[in-house]
């Protein structure tokens, strides 16, 4: 059974909606990833996880074409970065997801590969839930790999896994090893550890939210410790994300949706 939305012929779209396929929308960014990784890291990682999950899901998951660009103003000091204004990004992602709902799909999963997109993806998912009868959720792919990260992580927390770091470098080494310029990996950089309250890590940030403009605080563009990356770790991280995404989509499909209630006073004049 086809697993990529873009390969369907239109009557097949209708059939898959009727069969209750779960739509996964991969969302990423084009941005600098230090001296050693290409600017497409977020795209490559999220595409691998979402397309593999769909391929192995026996018809349950349909992965939509990727949304390549993300909210990235903070990174514009580094060449290669493309940014989409936050409101434009949200409206765009909403319109893609909402188009799926209009075709009859009632389970939509936004899988994100770029940290600064996450809060916006969360809001888009809520907007779909608040404006349609479909259910929509949002997650970053690295959260789905947490069991493998807990087992294999060597970089210190917080700060070792944030950007072009042990995690992202390992994943890219696994998926596109020929494009990793390992000889250009520099030392560990943890630019946001400026306060005990402000720090960044893929697996938990500090209690105070603050995202500085990146070129003020990073020299290489890296945040974390890419020296600790290996392709074997990358494979384990990726496999864990893929398995958990399939498991979540099964649960999500089976989730029942109780009727909404309205306890408000019904004013006859309104
Ligand atoms: Zn990245």
Image (spheres, helix red, strand yellow):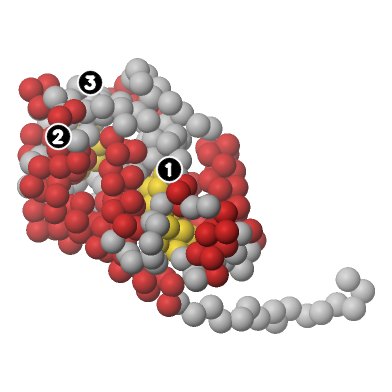
Quadrant containing the C terminus is bottom right
Q: Secondary structure at mark 2?
A: helix
120 is higher (above) or lower (below) than 169? below
Residue highlighted by disc 2: 177
Question: How many numbered markers are drawn?
Answer: 3
Residue highlighted by disc 3: 219
Q: Is label 3's Cβ within 8 Å of ligand 1?
A: no
Do the residues bearing badges 1 and 2 touch, measured as CB atoms within 8 Å? Answer: no
Of the two numbered discs 2 and 3 on the same chain, state the one appearing first in sequence: 2
Residue highlighted by disc 1: 66
* Distance in Å between CA atoms under marks 2 and 3: 24 Å
Res. 250 image quadrant:
bottom left
Give the left or right position of residue 93, taking residue 114 as reference.
Answer: right
* Distance in Å between CA atoms under marks 1 and 3: 30 Å
Q: Residue furthest right?
A: 269
Q: Secondary structure at mark 3?
A: loop
């Amino acid at each position: 059974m086809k697993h990529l939305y873009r390969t369907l012929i239109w009557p097949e779209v209708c059939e898959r909606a009727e069969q209750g396929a779960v739509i996964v929308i991969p969302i990423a960014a084009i941005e600098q990833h230090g001296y050693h990784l290409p600017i497409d890291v977020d795209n490559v990682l999220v595409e691998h996880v979402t397309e593999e999950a769909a391929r192995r899901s026996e018809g349950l998951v349909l992965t939509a074409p990727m949304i390549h660009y993300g909210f990235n103003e903070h990174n514009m000091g580094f060449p290669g970065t493309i940014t989409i204004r936050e409101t434009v990004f949200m409206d765009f992602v909403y319109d893609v997801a909402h188009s799926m709902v209009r075709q009859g799909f009632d389970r939509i999963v936004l899988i994100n590969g770029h940290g600064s997109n996450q809060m916006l993806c969360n809001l888009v998912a809520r907007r779909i839930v608040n404006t349609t009868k479909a259910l929509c959720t949002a997650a970053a792919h690295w959260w789905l790999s947490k069991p493998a990260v807990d087992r294999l992580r060597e970089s210190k927390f917080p700060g070792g896994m944030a950007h072009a770091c042990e995690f992202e470098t390992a994943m890219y080494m696994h998926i596109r090893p020929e494009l990793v310029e390992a000889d250009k990996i520099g030392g560990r950089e943890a630019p946001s550890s400026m306060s005990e309250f402000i720090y960044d890590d893929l697996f938990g940030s500090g209690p105070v939210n603050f995202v500085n403009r990146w070129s003020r605080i990073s020299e290489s563009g890296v945040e974390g410790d890419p020296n600790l990356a290996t392709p074997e770790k990358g494979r384990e991280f990726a496999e864990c994300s893929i398995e958990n995404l399939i498991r979540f989509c099964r649960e999500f499909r089976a989730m029942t949706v109780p009727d909404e209630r309205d306890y408000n006073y019904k004013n006859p004049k309104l």
